[in-house]
Image: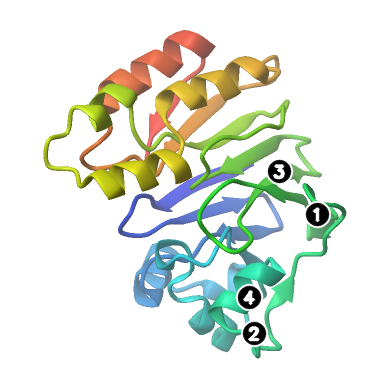
Amino acid sequence: MKIEVIASGSAGNCYKLSNEDTTLLIECGIPYLKIQEKLNFKLSDIDACFISHEHKDHSRDYKKLLDFGTKVYMTEGTKATLDPRDYRIEILEREDQEFYKDFKIGSFKIKPFKTIHDAKEPVGFLIKDLISKESLVFITDSKYCKYKFSVDYMLLEVNYTARAINQNPNLNPRLRKRIKETHMSLETAIDFILKSDLKRLKMIYLIHLSENNSEENYIKESIQKLTGVPVYVC
């Protein structure tokens, strides 16, 4: 399983996941041209794109991907917010109130699950490589995650630290409240990691760090010390 961070943060998010015969995008929150450039204009290699929720830094140019012929997957709630009439959008099928039915794209198996954000129907993704047997969990823009995973890789949002956000004198109180209610802090991420089964864990990718409310080195060192695996700040 090969993981490539194309963009991460409030300005836009896009991640590439591939193996020897299948390539996926997670999010398309940057301009279409930049996606093309990052993929060396080989957009035909992309088998599908998954969008976690409707906010523009995650979904910006999904229509251009559709126009090119790329399959784009999202929840019914995300579609209803973006464009309920677009018949080309692939809808993630619910299993129950928390999870969605798993399905295959090439040699990847995808299991979407509910996340906690101020969006219509946001999700994270558990993805398994059926060739290498490796697995990855992708969680972004979520206050917390109540599920436990045993995976090889985590793409995990750590948007802020409690001390940084509380000590930022320039942060509007309403925005501070929203961030705390819709994004994952270092403290919450540590709690999630501690509840996970870390036996298989090989690497953690920290995504969607706030430019003003995170402490990159402190976050990296804290999680690396906790897990003992390499930590890459995106």
Above-or-below relation of 7 to 196 = below
Label 2 belongs to which residue?
A: 84
Q: In the image, residue 195 lies at what x, y percent?
A: 66, 18
The number of numbered discs placed on residues in the rendered structure image is 4
Given the current orientation, which residue lies at the most extreme front position?
Answer: 173
Label 3 belongs to which residue?
A: 126
Q: Earlier in the sequence, mark 1 or mark 2?
A: 2
Which amino acid type is shown beneath numbered disc 1?
Tyr
Crowding at mark 1 (Cα within 10 Å: few <14, some 14-19, many 20+):
some
Q: Earlier in the sequence, mark 1 or mark 3?
A: 1
| Cα gap from disc 4 to disc 1, whole angstroms | 15 Å
Crowding at mark 2 (Cα within 10 Å: few <14, some 14-19, many 20+):
few
| Cα gap from disc 1 to disc 2, whole angstroms | 19 Å
Tell me if 64 is positioned left or right of 208 in this view.
right
Task: Give whichever of 77, 103 is nearer the camera.
Answer: 77
Label 1 belongs to which residue?
A: 100
Above-or-below relation of 7 to 146 = below
- Can you tell which mark lies on residue 79? 4
Which amino acid type is shown beneath numbered disc 2?
Pro
| Cα gap from disc 4 to disc 2, whole angstroms | 5 Å
Q: In the image, residue 34 lies at what x, y percent?
A: 35, 69
Task: Give whichever of 201, 99 is nearer the camera.
Answer: 99
